Amino acid sequence: MPAPERLPAPGVSDTGEMEELLAEGELTVIGRIREASNAVLLCSVTYEGVSADCVYKPVKGERPLWDFPDGNLAQREVAAYLVSEATGWGLVPATVLRDGPYGEGMVQRWIEAEEPAPDAADAPLGPLLGLVDGEEAGEGWKPVALAEVGEGRTALLVHADDPRLRRIAVFDAVINNGDRKGGHLLPAPDGRLYGIDHGVTFHAEDKLRTLLWGWAGEPLTGEAREVLAALAAGLAPGAPLATRLAELITAVELAAVRDRVEVLRRTGIHPRPSGQWPAIPWPPV
């Protein structure tokens, strides 16, 4: 029997054949990603002679959270993918909800991230984040906050002034991402930037917690305003996106998504921290 064909790196949008492969293919567990707080299994998926690596997060392996319903994080990961696809930005790897070796769970295409150069002293947290001395971010960087880094020393947490990150900042504001860490940002070798780990999203209360506050209070780009207008239409009652989201999150949470989109459109600026919830995840990775 010939070996299954390995799929190349993702294209502009992970839809169609990739979703079919993830949903219908045979899952084979390769190992467990132990750094994750919930059960995360690295798998291969094969269907009709085509295969790819993927991540499988069984619902049974979800750790209970005080502010989210039990056994619901996988659905939120899929909902985040649907919103990402609706933006046209393709920020989230293809994601489906399906049965697997350990029951129902989220299955998402594995993204092999580009590793930062070992001598990247200007970006010790990776190619998109950094800690710098002083209170000036420097050219090409956006300041986030002063952080204690041990022995009474403080450093300025910064992120790159990168349009790819700016898109993710808008996306996170829409889905109310409660945990945007640096380790959840995956620069691919082809130049694309992906975001992963979207279980703690879509809460009806303001839970936005992110490292990407560098644009807080600044005007949204024209591109972002156009995307938000399209999202508003897609979230209208009876629209396909709204119908699919209604199967994954509660009616109250869906209404809150609509409200967040409308606030962004009305104010025309990137949101600022609310002050009612820790604004920055720590540690940042």
Image (cartoon, grey):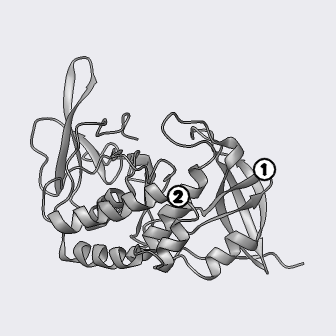
Could you classify mark 1 by the number of other residues whose Cα lies within 10 Å: few (under 14), some (14-19), or many (20 or more)? few
Tell whether 172 sits left or right of 102. left
Q: What amino acid type should be assigned to the residue bearing mark 1?
A: Tyr
Nearer-the-camera pick, 127 or 158: 158
Relative to 82, say whether 127 is above or below.
above
Q: Secondary structure at mark 1?
A: loop
Q: Quadrant of residue 22?
A: bottom right
Q: Secondary structure at mark 2?
A: loop
Mark 2 or 1: in front is 2
Q: Write the residue at 51% across / 63% down.
A: 79
Tell whether 226 sits left or right of 58. left
Q: Write the residue at 60% across / 54% down.
A: 74
Q: What amino acid type should be assigned to the residue bearing mark 2?
A: Ile
Q: Quadrant of residue 127?
A: bottom left
Q: How many marks?
A: 2
Relative to 154, say whether 57 is above or below.
below
Q: What label sits on residue 102 in the rendered view?
A: 1
Q: What label sits on residue 276 in the rendered view?
A: none
| Residue extending farthest top | 151
Q: Write the residue at 41% across / 73% down.
A: 235
| Residue 144: % across, % down | 20, 44
Dot 2 or dot 1, earlier in sequence: 1
- From the image, which quarter does the N terminus lie in? bottom right
Nearer-the-camera pick, 240 or 140: 240
Is residue 150 among the parts visible in the rendering?
yes
How far apart are the two marked residues, 2 and 1, measured between alpha carbons? 23 Å
For label 2, the residue is: 249
Nearer-the-camera pick, 25 or 260: 260
Q: Quadrant of residue 188?
A: bottom left
